[in-house]
Image (cartoon, rainbow, N blue to C red):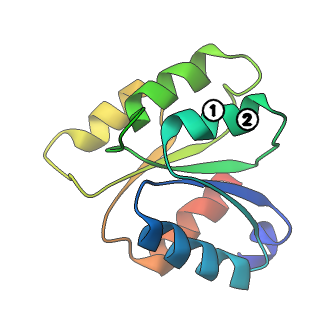
Amino acid sequence: MEAKLRNRTVLIVDDDERNRFALSTYLELLEMRVVTADNGQTALDLLKGGEVVDIILLDIMMPVMDGYEVLNHLRKDEAFSQIPVIAVTAQAMKGDDRRCLEAGASDYVAKPVELNNFVSKIAQWL
C-alpha cells in the first residue's frame, strides 16, 4: 500500500492549521508530496495556477469557499474533473456521506480521522 503513495502528490484543503499539519506530517512520512490550502478558493487558485495533484483531501466546512462549492467547480472543469477527492468533515451528520458523494466526492471520511483507514482509502483511489 505504501508504495502506491510514494512520490504521489496530495492536496490537503482544510481551514484548521492543526489538521493540515497532522495530515501533512503523516503523509510526508509515507513519502508523499504534500501541498496545502487553508480554504477552497486557495485550493482552486493553486490548481488553476498549474499545481498538479494526484488526489485531494477536502474539508467540507471552511470559510471563503466550502468543500461543496469546491467540488462543484472541480467536477465542472474538465481539467480537474477526474481527480479523486476524499471529503473530510467533522460535522458528520446522518446523510452527510451521501451529500458529499452526490456533490462529486469520490469518497468520504468523518473526523477525527483514523489514520490507517484513511491511508487505505487514499491508496485505493490512487
Pick the residue in front: 93 or 39: 39
Q: Secondary structure at mark 1?
A: helix
Q: Are marks 2 and 1 in contact (CB under 8 Å)?
A: yes
Query: Looking at the image, which residue is at 82% across and 43% down?
Result: 52
Q: CA distance from mark 2 to mark 1?
A: 5 Å
Q: Position of residue 104 (x, y in %)?
A: 48, 28
Q: Amino acid at mark 1?
A: Leu
Name above or below for residue 47 compared with residue 15: above
In the rendered structure, the answer to whether residue 39 lies left or right of residue 90 reads: right
Q: Residues within 10 Å of mark 2 (few under 14, many from 20)?
A: some
Quadrant in which residue 83 is drawn: top right
Pick the residue in front: 48 or 109: 48
Name above or below for residue 69 compared with residue 46: above
Name above or below for residue 92 compared with residue 47: below
Name above or below for residue 52 compared with residue 89: above
Image quarter in which the C terminus is found:
bottom right
Q: Position of residue 62 (x, y in %)?
A: 36, 44
Q: Secondary structure at mark 2?
A: helix
Residue at mark 1: 44
Considering every residue shown, the one lying at the far bottom of the view is: 29
Query: Looking at the image, which residue is at 61% across and 40% down?
Result: 43
Residue at mark 2: 47
Query: Looking at the image, which residue is at 63% across and 32% down?
Result: 44
Q: Position of residue 11 (x, y in %)?
A: 65, 53
Q: Amino acid at mark 2?
A: Leu
Q: Position of residue 57 (x, y in %)?
A: 54, 53
